[in-house]
Amino acid sequence: MSATATPWPSTQIATPNSRIVYASYGISRSSISCFCNGRKGESWKNLSSVSHISATKPFSQFHGYNVLKSESHVVKAMSGASDKQPLPGLPVDLRGKRAFIAGVADDNGYGWAIAKSLAAAGAEILVGTWVPALNIFETSLRRGKFDESRMLPDGSLMEITKVYPLDAVYDCPEDVPEDVRTNKRYAGSTNWTVKEVAESVKQDFGTIDILVHSLANGPEVSKPVLETSRNGYLAAISASSYSFVSLVQNFIPIMNPGGSTISLTYIASERIIPGYGGGMSSAKAALESDTRVLAFEAGRKHNIRVNTISAGPLRSRAAKAIGFIDMMIDYSLQNAPLQKELTADEVGNAAAFLASPLASAITGSVVYVDNGLNAMGVGVDSPVFRDLDIPKANKS
């Protein structure tokens, strides 16, 4: 990964009209979101075979942004010179679509991978970043630290039209406690509640087509449910599941009909995963239930699809917070039908499909992207199965 301080070759830095948004990466030091990973996989090759997109002029040139020092990165969506020409075969084509991804604070998790896949398919990318992580994220982008991770199948770099500060725990300014407002981590950031961010996106771009929820937080995730406090439990529900409801509520008025919303869940919503505590399993169960109800309500009233991706364990900075991600990955390798390590790109490509017209009849669904681990009823690596003729894990 490059760590040079060279400027972006195709990125302009512009003022965010005093608005930026936060894309919480879903976890603090003592909390956890879905298991994540930033590793590259061969799935990019598959996506590149159906989508070849080259960069065009920076979006800021068409919207008159005032160029400032290094406040916000303005980047245009990937769209080719042959926008009016149909792509060959049956492509994931998102050209002309605009996506807002809430939950991107580094290049190592699901949110980043989803943004890359959407960009590779032609979508314009807007990002929401957790307020305390905003400066580090933007600085890393500006200095080229993410350039290697930004590489798309056609050799161009993923571009981000605008980064907004966002704290999805708060719906509107009236909800923000005074101690949070005065916290130095939030100093200098304005208009970062969900309602304010949605209004900012409307003012800046008018509408969006794709909304992605890639954030969660469980302050007591390391505690068993039996030891979880009420505040810790409710905090997990608020940050990890209700935040999706809030995002849909506030963004759906500016979503074009036929649009798509996607969230990220985990198998702990329906199976026991010891160690995934603090109310996080309950939060994921609520998220999946809300996905079904929102699919009905948003579909009937706004023609918007609502789905969630249940991803397998991936190694990321966020996932490491619970302390046993390596064991979960090893368990999956030993027991999943597909004996390979899951990559974040595979999750990103599934999201691109769900956001595309190819999935126009899919809504209210939990889509498993976990090498088939969800289908297993037992762990075949258990010694009790040693005498059965079961294919053993490929350790190569």
Image (cartoon, rainbow, N blue to C red):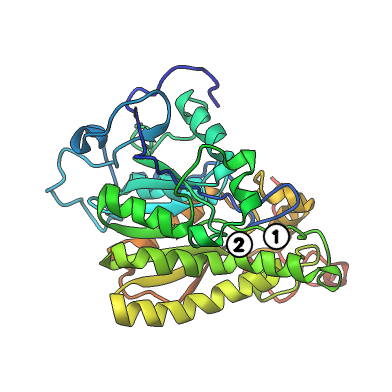
| Residue at 22 percent of width and 51 percent of height | 96
* Residue 386 visible in this rendered orientation of the protein: no
Q: Residue furthest front?
A: 178
Residue 10 spot, x, y in % from top left: 32, 26
Q: Quadrant of the C terminus?
A: top right
Mark 1 secondary-structure assignment = loop
Pointer 1 local density, CA inside 10 Å: few below 14, some 14–19, many at least 20: many
Alpha carbon distance from label 2 to label 1: 8 Å
Q: Amino acid at mark 2?
A: Ala
Left or right, 287 with reference to 268: left
| Residue at 37 percent of width and 41 percent of height | 162
Quadrant in which residue 155 is drawn: top left
Residue 20 spot, x, y in % from top left: 43, 43
Pointer 2 local density, CA inside 10 Å: few below 14, some 14–19, many at least 20: many
Query: Which residue in the protein does label 2 denote?
Result: 239
**Is label 2 in contact with label 1 (beta carbons under 8 Å)?**
yes
Above/below status of 347 relative to 58: below
The disc, 2 or 1, on the residue closer to the chain's N-terminal end is 1
Mark 2 secondary-structure assignment = helix
Quadrant in which residue 234 is drawn: bottom right
Query: Which residue in the protein does label 1 denote?
Result: 218
Q: Amino acid at mark 1?
A: Gly
Residue 125 spot, x, y in % from top left: 36, 46
Above/below status of 68 relative to 31: above
Left or right, 58 with reference to 218: left
Above/below status of 66 relative to 126: above
The foreground one among 340 and 97 is 97
The foreground one among 31 and 203 is 203
| Residue at 69 percent of width and 55 percent of height | 32
The foreground one among 208 and 310 is 208
* Residue 274 visible in this rendered orientation of the protein: yes
| Residue at 55 percent of width and 44 percent of height | 131
